[in-house]
Image (cartoon, rainbow, N blue to C red):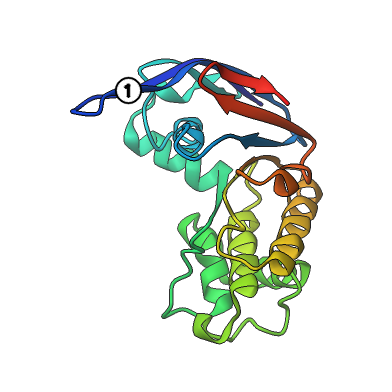
Amino acid sequence: MLAIKSLSKSFSGPRAKTVLRDISFDLAAGDYVAVMGESGIGKSTLLNLVAGLDRPDSGQVLFDGTDLCTLGDDALTLVRRKHMGFVFQAFHILPYLTVAQNVALPLALNGIGKKPMRARVGALLDSVKLGERGESMPHELSGGEMQRVAIARALVHKPRLVFADEPTGNLDPESASDVLALLRECVKGEGAAGILVTHSSAAARTTDRIYVLGQDGLRPA
């Protein structure tokens, strides 16, 4: 499904540096992998390149054989909207929408009708154990519950690729453990491929395999 070939990325300016150099790996449907590394090593940069949120200096990001690096911004937006889901450390839940409305956003953007939208949102909220909280507002939720909403929103449109960037960074240990188990269960249950970026060994162990990003590139743990 996904083939990363020789990705490199540098930043210019007063503190110019090469962040990523010659990074390659493959991801098949059903794979769930972790990318670990020290803070500032380039984990989030790698995720942004793979998701088409940033452009590499060189290399390819092949999704079903199409190099995302060659697509224009509008085409990349459509690919992300239809085929990718994102879970972030900061939740990014819209405070003026209910839980159900937040989860429904990707479906609305993809033009899904109201009846199938309600059914899918209900199913996802049940799967993340928030079936009774659809009409709740975000300020009524705990941090762990908000991250579960974010997981449901990331998966509601049945993306083929799921990206999670330090999804437990703002959670207490018990909530973090619950969210990690739920994220794995949902990604695998939906048949998606997932990349978890983390500095936590415990979080990384919930995936199928672990890569470590360092100054010498990306290597299996």
Taking the spot 49% from the left edge, 38% from the top edge, the residue there is: 79
- Give the quarter of the image for residue 15: top left
- Residue at x-position 57% and y-position 58%: 169
Which residue lies under the disc numbered 1?
17
146 w.r.t. 84: above or below = below
Front residue of 144/114: it is: 144
167 left or right of 45 in image? right
Dividing the image into 4 quarters, which one contains the N terminus? top right
14 is higher (above) or lower (below) than 187: above
**In the image, residue 214 lies at what x, y percent?**
55, 24
Three-letter amino acid code of the residue under disc 1: Lys
Relative image position of residue 23 (x, y in whole percent): 54, 18
Please, what secondary structure does the residue beneath circle 1 have? strand
What residue lies at 57% left-to-right and 50% top-to-bottom?
Answer: 166
Tell me which corner region of the image, top left, top right, bottom left or bottom right, holds residue 205: top right
Residue for point 50% across, 20% down? 215
In the orientation shown, which residue stands out farthest toward the left? 14
111 or 60, which lies in front? 60
Q: Which residue is more in the foreground, 211 or 2? A: 211
Q: In this view, does 110 lie to the left or right of 70?
A: right
Q: Where is residue 106 in the image (x, y as percent from the top left)?
A: 52, 58
Image height of 103 relative to 66, above or below: below
Dot 1 alpha-carbon crowd within 10 angstroms: few under 14, some 14 to 19, many 20 or more: few
